[in-house]
Image (tube, rainbow, N blue to C red):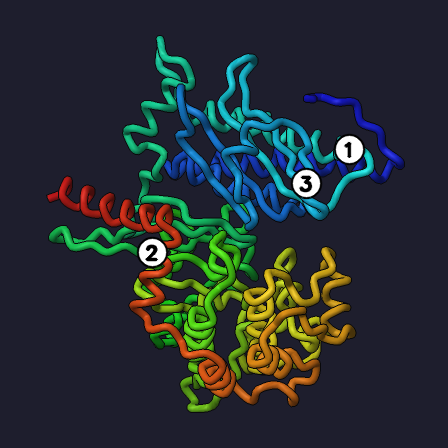
Amino acid sequence: MRHAPLKFDSVDEEVRFLRGLVAVQRLADEVLEDCVERQLGLATAADVFLTQCARMIHAQGAFVQVMGTQEPVLTRVWGTGLTDVVGWAAARGPLPLDADRTVFVAALDLGKLVLGSIGFVLPGHFSDGGLQVMALVETIAEIFDSAILSFIALSEGHTPNERLDELAAAGDFRPNARIGKYELLNPLGTGGMAQVMVARTVNPGGVSRLVALKRILPRLADDEAIVKQFLDEAKLGMRLNHPNLVTVYDFGQASGAYFIAMELIAGVDFDHVIYWPHGPLPDTLLSAILSQALEGLHHAHEARGDDGLSMGLVHRDLSPHNLMVGFDGRVKVLDFGVAKMRNARTVTLPGIVKGKPLYMSPEQATAERIDRRSDLFSVGLMLHEALTGKRAFDQHDDTRTMESIVNDPLVRPPGIANHWWAVLEKALQKRPEDRYRNALEMAQAVRETARPMKEHELGAMLADKFPRRLADVTAWEQTKNRLASQRR
C-alpha cells in the first residue's frame, strides 16, 4: 500500500498535507541530532519521535516495535487503548477497530528486510479509506527507518536484525549519558513540552537513588517563555511537601538541557487503572485513589507564599495521566506545569494548551477567573470516567467538547449507584459555588461513599493486576544496583 496515489479536494488541503511531511522530517532531524549528540540511545529517540508525531496527526495512541531476528527488541507505546500492540504490529494499512477508531500501521523496512512496525490510532472512520493519513504514516515510517540505521552502526558481517539482537542483549538501548550528576537509564514518556526519564544520582562513595528526570524537549529549549514556565514548575514543586504530591528534589541546567529531578513513582497512572481489563473498579479502590489525590490537592490549594498570603494555587491540568498510584498504595498528584498562582502570568504560551479540554471546568473553558473549585470539577470528570469508562462531555473534538462542558446538562449514566451519583452531581455543577467548597470536603464525601482500601491492599492489588509494569520497576532497581557495583 506504500506510495498509494493521493487525491486532494483543494490546493489548501494539499498544502496542509505537504506541511505535515515537512514538519515530520524537521522533527526527525531534531530528535536524532539531540539523541546522537547526547548519547541518549534509540529508546529515547523512539519515545520522543513517536509521541511528537502522534500529536502532530492528532492520534489518540501510537506504538513502535523494532524487531530482532526472532522477536521484538524494543517496544514504545504512547496514549491509551492500545490493548493489542502485538497483533496490530503484524498488520499493514488502515484497520478499523470499532465504531470510533482506526489504527494505521506501516512497516519499518529496508527493501525486503523488515525492522518492525509503527502505528497510530485515530478517532473515526475515513471516507477515502484513510489514504492521506496512511501516506503520512508511511512517510513517518520511512523517516524512522533512517533513525534506526543511525543508531545501529552496522558491523561488517552482521545483518541489521542480528545487530539489534546484540544491542538489546547488551542493554545498549538504554540511554548511556548524564545530565549533571544524573545518569540516565530509561525513557518514561514524552509530553508536549518535556520528556521524562528514569535516572540515578551519581554521588561519591557509590550512594545513589532513582529519580524521574524531566527535561525540556530540544526544539523548545531556546524558548524563553517555556523555560520560565518549566522553572516555575520546579520552584513551585520545591515549595510543596505532602505525602500525596510528588516531591521535587532538584532543578537546573546541565549539558545544555534544563531539568527537574523529582521523586520516581513505582506504579501506574490512573488512566491505566481506569481502563484495566479486569472488570469494574472496586468502590474501595476508587475511594482510596481519589480521596488521597484530593488530600494532596487540598495541601496545594492551601499553600502560602513567603509573605504568608495564600498563593491561590490551581492545578488546572488535572487528568488521569497526572495521578500516579504506587505499588506501595500511595497516590501522588503530578505535573503542576501549567498551575496558576496569585499574580502569575496568565498569557498562554505558543503551542502549549493550559489544561486538557476533556478535563476542563466550564469557567476554565470560557477563560474566566478560576479558583480551587475548578480542580474539583476535573476530579469529578475523572470519577465519571472511572465509573463508566466514558468521558462525561467528550464530543471527539476539542472545541465541541469545551462547548458541551459549558452548556450541556450532566446526564446520569445508566446503572450508576445512587451514592456515587450524589458525589458526581455535586462535583460537576456548572457554577463553582454549587460544588464542594474545597478538596478536603470532597475527599470526605468520597470516603463516606465507600470505605477507602488501605494502602497495602491498594498496592498489592495493583502489583497483581500490572505484573509487566512491576517487572519494569524491578528492572530499574536492578540496573541501578548493577551500575553502582560496577563503579565501586
Residue positioned most to the right: 10
Q: Position of residue 487 (x, y in %)?
A: 14, 42
Q: Position of residue 452 (x, y in %)?
A: 40, 76
Decide: few, some or many residues near mark 2? Use Cα within 10 Å; few <14, some 14-19, many ≥20. many
Seen from the viewer's position, the closer of residues 47 and 326 is 326
Tell me if residue 317 can be seen: no
Residue beneath disc 1 = 129
CA gap, disc 3 to disc 2?
Answer: 31 Å
Question: Is disc 1 placed on a helix, strand or loop?
Answer: loop
Decide: few, some or many residues near mark 1? Use Cα within 10 Å; few <14, some 14-19, many ≥20. few
- What amino acid is at disc 2? Ala
- Circle nearer the viewer, 3 or 2: 2
Seen from the viewer's position, the closer of residues 159 and 378 is 378
Give residue 319's quadrant in the image: bottom right
Task: Tell me whether the residue at label 3 lies in contact with that at label 1, contact meaning CB atoms closer than 8 angstroms.
Answer: no
- What amino acid is at disc 3? Thr
Residue beneath disc 3 = 102
Q: Residue at x 53, y 52 (%)?
A: 191
Q: Residue at x 32, y 32 (%)?
A: 172
In the depicted structure, whether residue 419 falls above or below residue 122: below
